[in-house]
């Protein structure tokens, strides 16, 4: 239970809240986690001083909007899918390097970074899925279901980070980087043919991938919700 006196004291003294904040433990166990970490550290050591974490965060956001625009433009010219892939790669650079650079330079702003990074991710993902649907390579209902499943998982991760002090970036062997690579692979296939044949029927490649992603994310959401609820119940059982 929350201690009202402690809460009141923290609100009366904002600096106390900043001091009491403890960054959550980052858990990244995806396939590419270790080589990605080494690559990011290598880039952080060579990033010009005139570039800081905020610049990279902005790059990550703008590249998501640009990717959404490229997907939309692909309705008329499939070559824009190559531009979309480039934007996804730029998003990886901005989204992944910003925190690494801050830690490398010992310029961490844990609360600011956590909050801004997640807001940027939410807005950028909305722009991305809207662009994919507007481009006609995924139907709007599938895009909406995918976005809702993503936000459910997104919310659960945020709540678990606050309640358990663990920020799980990956789900099993897959993390944001692996998902970006799958998206780029899908763009490459869709640049030549947006449809695939399944059981004798032609279906949109991204509809098929979107439905699989929805099922996967909902399964992860249910599993984590049950797991984390049990953990918290065991930690705070009333006797």
Image (tube, rainbow, N blue to C red):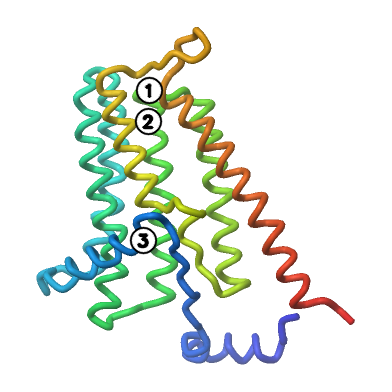
229 sits left or right of 136 in the view: right
Label number found at residue 137:
1
Quarter of the image for the C terminus: give it. bottom right
Q: CA distance from mark 3 to mark 2?
A: 27 Å
User: At x 52% / y 88%, what residue is drawn?
Assistant: 20
Sequence-wise first label, 3 or 2: 3
- Identify the mark nearer the N-term, 1 or 3: 3
Determine whether the residue tagged by mark 1 lies in a helix, strand or loop. loop
The location of residue 192, given as percent across then percent down, is 25, 19
Identify the disc placed on residue 82: none
Query: Residue 148: image x %, image y %?
Result: 56, 41
Taking 3 as reference, is 157 above or below it?
above
Question: Quarter of the image holding residue 56?
Answer: bottom left
Q: Quadrant of residue 28?
A: bottom left
211 over 229 or under it: above or below: above
The residue singled out by tag 2 in the image is: 132
Q: Residues within 10 Å of mark 3 (few under 14, many from 20)?
A: many
Distance from disc 1 to disc 2, alpha carbons, whole Å, reads: 6 Å
Residue 211: x %, y % from top left: 53, 30
**Whole-number angstrom distance, CA of label 1 to CA of label 3:** 30 Å
Marks 1 and 2 in Cβ contact (< 8 Å): yes
What residue is disc 3 on? 33
In the depicted structure, whether residue 172 falls above or below residue 164: above
């Amino acid at each position: 239970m929350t201690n009202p006196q402690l809460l009141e004291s923290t609100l009366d003294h904002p600096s106390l809240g900043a001091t009491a904040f403890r960054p959550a433990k980052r858990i990244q166990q995806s396939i590419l986690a270790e080589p990605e970490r080494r690559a990011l550290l290598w880039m952080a050591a060579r990033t010009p001083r005139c570039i800081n974490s905020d610049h990279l965060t902005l790059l990550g956001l703008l590249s998501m909007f640009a990717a959404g625009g490229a997907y939309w433009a692909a309705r008329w010219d499939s070559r824009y899918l190559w531009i979309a892939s480039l934007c996804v790669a730029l998003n990886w650079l901005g989204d992944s390097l910003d925190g690494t650079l801050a830690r490398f330079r010992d310029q961490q702003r844990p609360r600011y970074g956590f909050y801004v990074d997640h807001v940027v991710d939410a807005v950028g993902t909305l722009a991305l899925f809207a662009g994919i649907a507007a481009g006609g390579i995924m139907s709007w209902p599938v895009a909406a279901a995918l976005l809702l499943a993503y936000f459910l998982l997104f919310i659960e991760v945020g709540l678990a980070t606050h309640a358990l002090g663990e920020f799980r970036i990956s789900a099993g062997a897959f993390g944001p980087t692996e998902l970006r690579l799958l998206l780029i692979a899908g763009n490459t296939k869709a640049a030549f043919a947006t449809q695939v044949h399944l059981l004798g029927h032609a279906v949109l490649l991204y509809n098929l991938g979107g439905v699989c992603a929805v099922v996967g994310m909902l399964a992860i959401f249910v599993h984590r919700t049950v797991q984390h609820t049990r953990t918290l119940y065991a930690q705070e059982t009333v006797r």
